[in-house]
Amino acid sequence: ELERCRADLQKAQANMDKLKTDLDKKTMEIVLLKKSKQELEAEQKYEIDRLKDQSRRDKDELTKVHERAKQALRKELSDVQEEVGRLRSQLLSTEEELQANIDKLSSAQTQANNLAHEHKELEETNTRMKERITRLE
């Protein structure tokens, strides 16, 4: 029975080591996902600021064009509306990508929490097994 308990303890320890390795991997994935999320947010902020600046420049240009000729303004306005539609579509796509990354991060955090809980349970089982072996010895 002592040998069986020792074998069970070794299995539990091996399982605990595997879970710890898995937890470390998931933790690294979370760190990488957070870094990717931060980089994506920084890129999006830069792009939004750039687009806002471009939009302001376009508006100033449209004002000058309007003063020169209404016909030219109509064509330019049409071009700008198409550009705004494209930029909105691009922004929506980027927001969807960000949400997908947030969902991945949330999932990874949930998995890490689950692994941590399992790790704790295994440690408690391991402690009980060690106490039982000590009593049996």
Image: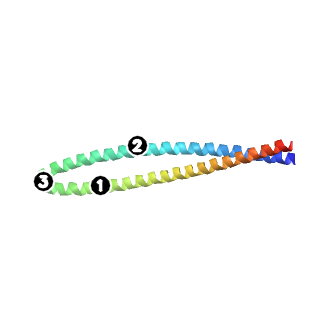
Identify which amino acid the numbered label 1 is placed on.
Val
> Residue 58, how many percent across, how many down?
23, 48
The label shown at residue 69 is: 3
Residue positioned 57% across, 52% down in the render:
110
Decide which of tag 2 and tag 3 comes sooner along the chain.
2
The label shown at residue 16 is: none
Task: Mark 3: give few (<14), some (14-19) or many (20+) Cα within 10 Å.
Answer: few
> Residue 129, how many percent across, how many down?
78, 46
The quadrant of the picture occupied by the C terminus is top right
The CA span between labels 1 and 3 is: 22 Å
Residue positioned 32% across, 44% down in the render:
49
Q: Secondary structure at mark 1?
A: helix
Marks 1, 3: nearer the viewer: 1
Residue 30 placement, left or right of 68: right
> Residue placed farthest to the left in the image?
68
Decide which of tag 2 and tag 1 comes sooner along the chain.
2
Q: Are marks 2 and 1 in contact (CB under 8 Å)?
A: no
The CA span between labels 2 and 3 is: 40 Å
Decide which of tag 1 and tag 3 comes sooner along the chain.
3
Q: Which residue position is annotated with label 2?
A: 42
Q: Which residue position is annotated with label 1?
A: 84
Identify which amino acid the numbered label 3 is placed on.
Ala
Residue 49 placement, left or right of 65: right
The residue closer to the viewer here, 62 or 10, is: 10
Residue 26 placement, left or right of 92: right
Residue positioned 31% across, 57% down in the render:
85
The CA span between labels 2 and 1 is: 21 Å
